Image: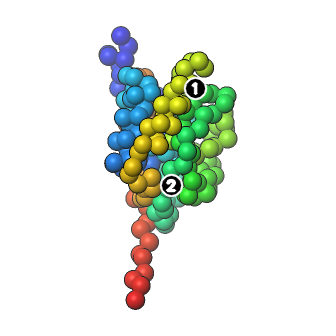
Amino acid sequence: MECESNGNQRLNCYALVTYIPDPLGKFLDDLRKELVPGSNPHAHVTLMPPRPLQSEQLAWEQIVEYTANLPAFDLQIGQIAVFPKTNVIYLEIGVGRDQLLEIHDGMNREALLFNEPFPYHPHITLAQELSAPEVPAAAEIARQRWAEFRSDRWFAVDHLAFVQNSVCNIWTDLGTVQLVRQPVPVRR
């Protein structure tokens, strides 16, 4: 099998993501495994969807430069939804959505420029590549599990990871940038 012998062969396919910390990240990984058995998820929000690059080095330099003074911010996770054209089941982003859009728009230029097949829509993917008849039941399971989740639905975006895909759809972290933490004034 190709994936067993060449599983680490990297593709010209890169993205920029922020990983979701536990316990929310673990819950989302477990939910994705339930919805798509055999998947190997790492819960994240994509800021720059997968794209080919002319130069990995120039793209990385652009990421480092753009994020040098970028403040950390919070994201709030919203409700379960389904993209109608692709049948992808996902979680909406509430608070923080505007920052994600601004970062995407500000970075989709020069070395990272890519004409994406769909308009950028910040979200957390829970299930994809399901057949159309499977989607309603899977979406209902996702809604039930999300309603049962009792931990925090917020997390801080304080780092971004530049990642590259492989033949077997295994994403490898190439580099991480820390976002600037803003001091919180002490109230007296």
* Rendering coords of residue 31 (x, y %): 41, 34
Q: How many marks?
A: 2
* Rendering coords of residue 103 (x, y %): 57, 55
Q: Is residue 30 above or below residue 133?
A: below
- Residue occupied by mark 2: 76
Residue 10 visible within the image = no
Callout 1: few (<14), some (14-19), or many (20+) C-alpha neighbours within 10 Å? few
Q: Is residue 155 above or below residue 168?
A: below
Is 163 left, or right, of 85 in this rendering?
left
* Rendering coords of residue 85 (x, y %): 67, 28
- Say what secondary structure mark 2 lies in: strand
Query: Mark 2: which amino acid?
Result: Gln
Q: Quadrant of residue 25?
A: top left
Q: CA distance from mark 2 to mark 1?
A: 25 Å
Residue 60 visible within the image = yes
- Say what secondary structure mark 1 lies in: helix
Depth check: 51 or 145 in front? 145
- Residue occupied by mark 1: 136
Q: Residue at x 48, y 62 (%)?
A: 73
Callout 2: few (<14), some (14-19), or many (20+) C-alpha neighbours within 10 Å? some
Query: Mark 1: which amino acid?
Result: Pro
Q: Residue at x 60, y 20 (%)?
A: 132
Is 41 left, or right, of 73 in this rendering?
left
